[in-house]
């Protein structure tokens, strides 16, 4: 049998294959755009001989694609390749961040998080099939549309699917040192709204009660609660339409990250304590989607890490393992106790920015790594 480490992965070929993925922009809140991305991937999976299913979206979000790869035991539990195809970049970002290669770096919206990793792992499956290499376990692929907003519509789908499998691979971008994630901190989201009293800002300013002013003071209070082990970040702030009006409504969104469930519970209590339902300006705080703590050092995951380190050593790089913040759908599968290896995708920098890029040499490096993982994970 051909050694999976010797499969003919080609950087230029992979970049050419990635181009339509990146140039099909797919921001989470644009369901039609996400579904165009799902079309691209579903076609590629079908061309590999996979049995594909389109799972309709919920909550106004895009669809999911599930694919059963060719295998004598296709459809049975084995390895789940889990990734998301939504990005944080709105349609039109390509005008400012076009897909392009400059030497050892390649740029593009969503290339690092996480279309690059998804593509690499599919290319590994493509090359394994072309070489006639049968993986010990059958592989199922699940691509979802809403990870960037906390997975509000597909968590149940992910958890149900993951429970059928022995292992879960999540090709989110690698950690800064190139290492994998073997545990994740908890993440909670909150929506906030202040409601005040409108007035004409030039004529009767004193009669108004500004929702913006109250929210601004609260933003400073919230971010001031941040510690090394439990952080608070206000990432969305919306209010006002006319500068000559005292704004009566202001909306904000907050992300809390905590290293332990106890710290998360404390953080949630602090946020909910900000509710004020009386007075000139009221504050309403609602808890949104939550990612559970994925505790590190679970035996099954650590065994996967050991195998990954062995494979990486044969290729010529190192893979460390650590818990991390940021959140991913690996939170769900890891919290269920299913052996999960996360952040095993491409290496790069500046995800979620207009400088998002990957290191080109990580494409073939991670493809060989992925192919070997598919071939050495056994029941």
Image (cartoon, rainbow, N blue to C red):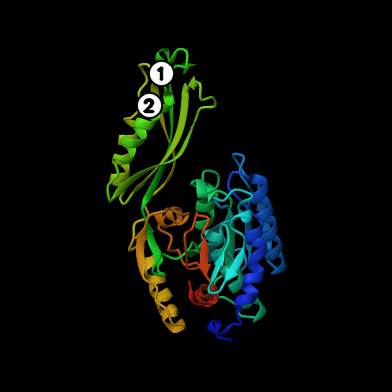
In the picture, measured across the screen, residue 292 lies left or right of residue 154, that is left
Asked if 150 appears above or below 177 in the picture, the reply is: above
Image quarter for residue 298?
A: bottom left
How many residues crowd around disc 2 within 10 Å: few (fewer than 14), some, or many (20 or more)? some
The answer to whether residue 268 of the structure is visible from this angle is no
Which element is circle 2 on? helix
Left or right placement of residue 246 versus residue 1 in this view:
left
Where does label 1 land, which residue? Answer: 209
Does the CB distance between marks 1 and 2 fall below 8 Å?
yes
The residue at the point 51 percent across, 57 percent down is 162
How far from the left and from the top, in percent, is residue 281? Answer: 39, 20
Q: How many marks?
A: 2
The residue under label 2 is: 214
Label 1's element?
loop
Q: Residue drawn 71% across and 62% down?
A: 43
The x and y percentages for residue 235 are 44, 42
């Amino acid at each position: 049998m051909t050694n999976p480490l010797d499969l003919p992965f080609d950087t230029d070929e992979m970049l050419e294959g990635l181009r339509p993925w990146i140039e099909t922009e797919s921001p989470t809140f644009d369901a039609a755009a996400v579904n165009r991305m799902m079309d691209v991937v579903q076609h590629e999976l079908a061309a590999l001989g996979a049995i594909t299913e389109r799972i309709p979206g919920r909550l106004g979000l895009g669809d999911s694609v599930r694919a059963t790869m060719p295998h004598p035991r296709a459809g049975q539990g084995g390895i789940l390749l889990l990734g998301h195809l939504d990005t944080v970049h709105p349609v039109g970002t390509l005008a400012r961040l076009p897909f392009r290669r400059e030497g050892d770096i390649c740029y593009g919206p969503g290339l690092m998080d996480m279309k690059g990793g998804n593509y690499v792992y599919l290319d590994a499956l493509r090359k394994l099939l072309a070489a006639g290499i049968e993986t010990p376990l059958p592989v199922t692929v699940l691509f979802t549309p809403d990870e960037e907003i906390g997975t509000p519509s597909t968590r149940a789908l992910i958890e149900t699917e993951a429970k059928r499998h022995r292992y879960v691979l999540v090709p989110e971008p690698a950690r800064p040192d190139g290492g994998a994630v073997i545990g994740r901190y908890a993440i909670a989201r909150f929506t906030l709204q202040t409601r005040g009293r409108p007035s004409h800002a030039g004529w009767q300013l004193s009669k108004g009660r500004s929702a913006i002013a109250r929210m601004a003071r609260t933003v400073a209070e919230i971010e001031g609660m941040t510690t090394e082990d439990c952080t608070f970040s206000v990432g969305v702030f919306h209010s006002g339409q006319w500068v000559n009006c005292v704004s009566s409504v202001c909306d904000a969104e907050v992300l809390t990250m905590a290293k332990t469930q106890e710290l998360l519970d404390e953080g949630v209590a602090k946020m909910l304590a900000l509710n004020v339902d009386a007075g000139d300006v009221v504050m309403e705080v609602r808890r949104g989607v939550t990612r559970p703590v994925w505790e590190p050092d679970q035996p099954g995951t650590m065994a996967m890490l050991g195998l990954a380190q062995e494979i990486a050593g044969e290729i010529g790089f190192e893979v460390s393992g650590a818990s991390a913040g940021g959140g991913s759908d690996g939170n769900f599968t890891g919290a269920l106790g299913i052996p999960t290896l996360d952040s095993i995708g491409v290496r790069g920098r500046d995800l979620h920015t207009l400088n998002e890029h990957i290191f080109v040499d990580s494409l073939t490096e991670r493809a060989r790594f992925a192919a070997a993982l598919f071939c050495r994970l056994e029941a």
